[in-house]
Image (tube, rainbow, N blue to C red):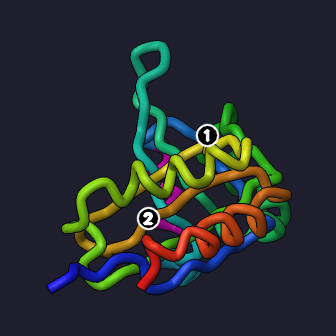
Amino acid sequence: ERESKIKIVTGKKNCVIVRMESIAASHLVALLERQRQYHDFVKLSPFKKDNREITRFLFLDADYVKRHEKIFRSFYPKVEMVYGRGVVTLIGDAMWKVPKIVSETSSIVSRQDINILNIDAQEETSRILIVVEDNSVEEVIRSIHSKGTIIN
C-alpha cells in the first residue's frame, strides 16, 4: 500500500523571523504563552554566534511583533526582526515516513528560482514548514500543487 504523502498545502504571508539569545528567548516565550496566551509562533532551529546560542522564532503575525517591539527589546536589546517573510506549511498523515519528501519538495520549489530561507520538518507533527519571502508564498503553493505526484 502506498504511504500517505502531502494532504494539505497552505500559506501565510506577513510573518517575521525573530532572533535573540536563547536564555532571553525562554523568558519571552514564558511571557507570551503564560501571561498573554499568545501562541502564534514556531521555534526554529537555534544557531551559535559569538559563543552564544541564538534562538529563532517564526511569528505568524508581523503586525503583532511590530506593535510589541518594545517588549521584545526589553528581553534582549539586540533582538533581530526580519520582516517580509512568508511560510508554506505541508501536512500529511505519515509524511515523515516517505523517503525524499523534503528533498523532493525543496527541489520543486528551487526549480521556480525561489530561495528557501528555512525549512523545518518534524516527525512528531507530520508537517513541513518552508519559510520564503512574502512575495513567493503563492508561487511555492502553485509549484507544489503542480507536482501532483507528491500530493495524494
Query: Tag 2: residue type?
Result: Ile
Quarter of the image with the N terminus in it: bottom left
Question: Does 28 appear in magenta?
Answer: yes
The answer to which image quadrant residue 3 occupies is: bottom left
94 vs 144, nearest the viewer: 144
Q: Count every numbered label the image shows and give the total.
A: 2
Task: Verify CB contact (< 8 Å) between mark 2 and mark 1.
Answer: no
Task: Name which residue lies at 59% across and 41% down.
Answer: 19
Q: Position of residue 37 (x, y in %)?
A: 54, 83
Range of residues picked out in magenta: 24-32
Query: Which residue is denoted by mark 1 in the rendering?
Result: 76
Mark 1, residues whose alpha carbon is within 10 Å: few (<14), some, or many (≥20)? some
Mark 2, residues whose alpha carbon is within 10 Å: few (<14), some, or many (≥20)? many
Instruction: Specify whether 134 is left or right of 74.
Output: right
48 vs 95, nearest the viewer: 95
Q: Position of residue 7 (x, y in %)?
A: 44, 85
First-in-chain label (2 vs 1): 1
Task: Name which residue lies at 48% across and 13% down.
Answer: 50
Q: Secondary structure at mark 2?
A: strand
Q: Is residue 133 above or below residue 96?
A: above
